[in-house]
Image: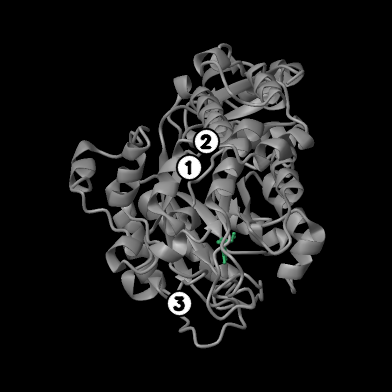
């Protein structure tokens, strides 16, 4: 908050990414952040540089003939008048103090984050959500980004104890989609007008670096879509090769920043290695995704506050926050569900603390209750991931029980219910076609999951 920053917008996403690479190479500290709402759709990104580096950055970009659309000073967040607007509040004095701090644009201390996470006062929670919503509107605007995910293999060599497709889970039918099957779905997403496809899988040795590169190149060549990879840990050279082949974003969640807990739930993954991977991904120019699971065994509010501060410090661009949901066949299968309300409060605080980031209203949240996804969109979340895995495979990508298969109609419904705007890349025809109140919600249709969902 103390330093001044500027946002540089290039004319195209491609030149934005290219430009960031140029600046990085010259030793300028940069960050890729969502563009402010008045200067682009939620999909557009900007290069953030400090005031001290601005002149040098401008010169370098000019030298490389990178066409700029504008340079804007980053405005400090001020939500003046919010408390007055909320009326005379029957809430505790220490709570008001923290809200005033947010209003004034000051950074929150860990203890303050914990205090807000801990609230059990419905009134306080509502105010927290409202503040997060304001921050979100001011920082990234009203539009929700929709991305399509293809879960292309459920083979996995890892043994993460919470995950329903881990290598030890017996009795799960394993599948791999072929390149042709994946491309067919990509073509559908492209035809819908979506801009980003997420490729997710277990850590499957069949999908080698070479095979993934071929796939990435085909997607880029045939659709030009932005590509998010969510395929676990690789060597630095592999991440670099994927980037060169067309990958733009990479999701690799930390799940928890409590080292002991991380080790306990990841018997064959190293905490430092995971953090190092994220550093590499950033260095290579990816937009990086992280996030956590709420309701892991022994996890405390202090752990969650530390997670949020880590996302900020690490400069994570996309932060997925979901409640723990037990998965059949895992050692945590009998553990209790994560708490919906705590998840929403964490979403809100992540928006308030990290500000210019993408926060999905996660599938895990939608799986516990469809309304929870809507609520997340009203408490700081600004994107939705559709599950576009073909029906014959969906059930087998069972990372947790009762997973909801959020489709475009469900996403449109949630965005409207939240009073938020649809992405501008969806044509009126597409919106009309998917607005016929035909949202697919597997829980509602089977009627099976909902009672369990509210155990949280
Ligand atoms: N409960 C909640 N989230 C889970 N994930 C995996 N298993 C579970 C579970 N049992 C999440 C992890 C992972 C993402 C793909 O799904 O955060 O990164």
Do callouts 1 and 2 mark residues in contact (Cβ within 8 Å)?
Answer: yes
Residue located beneath label 2 in the image = 380
Looking at the image, which residue is at 65% across and 57% down? 239
Tell whether 447 sits left or right of 324.
left
Residue 272: in sight, yes or no? no
Residue located beneath label 1 in the image = 376
Number of other residues with Cα within 10 Å of mark 1, as a class: few under 14, some 14 to 19, many 20 or more: many
Alpha-carbon span between mark 3 and mark 2: 35 Å
Q: Is residue 111 above or below residue 202?
A: above
Q: Is residue 19 above or below residue 198?
A: above
Residue located beneath label 3 in the image = 176
Q: Quadrant of ligand 1?
A: bottom right
Q: Give residue 265's position: percent from left, percent from top.
A: 71, 69
Do callouts 3 and 2 mark residues in contact (Cβ within 8 Å)?
Answer: no
Q: Picture quarter containing residue 118?
A: top right
Helix, strand or loop at disc 1? helix
């Amino acid at each position: 908050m103390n330093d001044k920053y500027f946002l540089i917008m290039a004319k195209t996403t491609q030149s934005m990414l290219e430009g960031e690479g140029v600046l990085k190479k010259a030793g300028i500290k940069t960050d890729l952040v969502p563009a402010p709402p008045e200067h682009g759709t939620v999909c557009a990104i900007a290069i953030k540089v400090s005031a001290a580096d601005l002149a040098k950055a401008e010169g370098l970009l000019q030298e490389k003939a990178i066409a700029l659309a504008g340079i804007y000073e980053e405005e400090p967040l001020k939500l003046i008048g919010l408390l007055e607007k909320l009326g005379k509040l029957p809430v505790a004095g220490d709570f008001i103090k923290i809200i005033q701090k947010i209003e004034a644009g000051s950074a929150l201390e860990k203890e303050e984050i914990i205090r807000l996470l801990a609230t059990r006062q419905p009134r306080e929670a509502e105010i927290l959500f409202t503040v997060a919503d304001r921050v979100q509107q001011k920082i990234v605007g009203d539009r929700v980004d929709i991305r399509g995910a293809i879960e292309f293999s459920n083979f996995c060599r890892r043994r993460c104890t919470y995950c329903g497709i881990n290598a030890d889970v017996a009795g799960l039918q394993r599948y791999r989609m072929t390149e042709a099957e994946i491309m067919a779905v990509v073509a559908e997403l492209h035809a819908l007008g979506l801009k980003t496809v997420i490729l997710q899988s277990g850590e499957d040795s069949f999908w080698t670096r070479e095979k993934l590169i071929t796939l990435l190149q085909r997607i880029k060549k045939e659709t030009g879509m932005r590509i998010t990879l969510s395929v676990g840990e690789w060597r630095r050279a592999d991440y670099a090769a994927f980037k060169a082949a067309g990958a733009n974003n990479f999701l690799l969640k930390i799940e928890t920043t409590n080292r002991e807990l991380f080790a306990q739930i990841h018997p064959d993954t190293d905490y430092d290695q995971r953090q190092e991977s994220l550093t590499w991904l950033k260095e290579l120019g990816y937009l990086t995704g992280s996030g956590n699971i709420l309701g892991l065994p022994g996890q405390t509010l202090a752990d969650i506050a530390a997670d949020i501060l880590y996302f900020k410090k690490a400069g994570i661009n996309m932060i997925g926050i979901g409640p723990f949901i037990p998965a059949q066949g895992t050692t945590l299968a009998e553990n209790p569900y994560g708490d919906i309300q705590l998840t929403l409060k964490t979403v809100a605080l992540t928006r308030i603390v990290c500000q210019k980031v993408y926060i999905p209203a996660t599938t895990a949240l939608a799986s516990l209750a469809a309304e929870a996804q809507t609520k997340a969109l009203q408490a700081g979340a600004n994107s939705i991931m559709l599950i576009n895995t073909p029906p014959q495979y969906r059930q087998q990508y069972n990372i947790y029980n009762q997973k909801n298969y959020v489709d475009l109609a469900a996403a449109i419904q949630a965005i409207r219910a939240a009073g938020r705007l649809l992405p501008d890349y969806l044509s009126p025809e597409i919106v009309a076609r998917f607005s016929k109140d035909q949202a697919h919600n597997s829980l509602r249709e089977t009627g099976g999951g909902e009672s369990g969902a509210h155990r949280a």
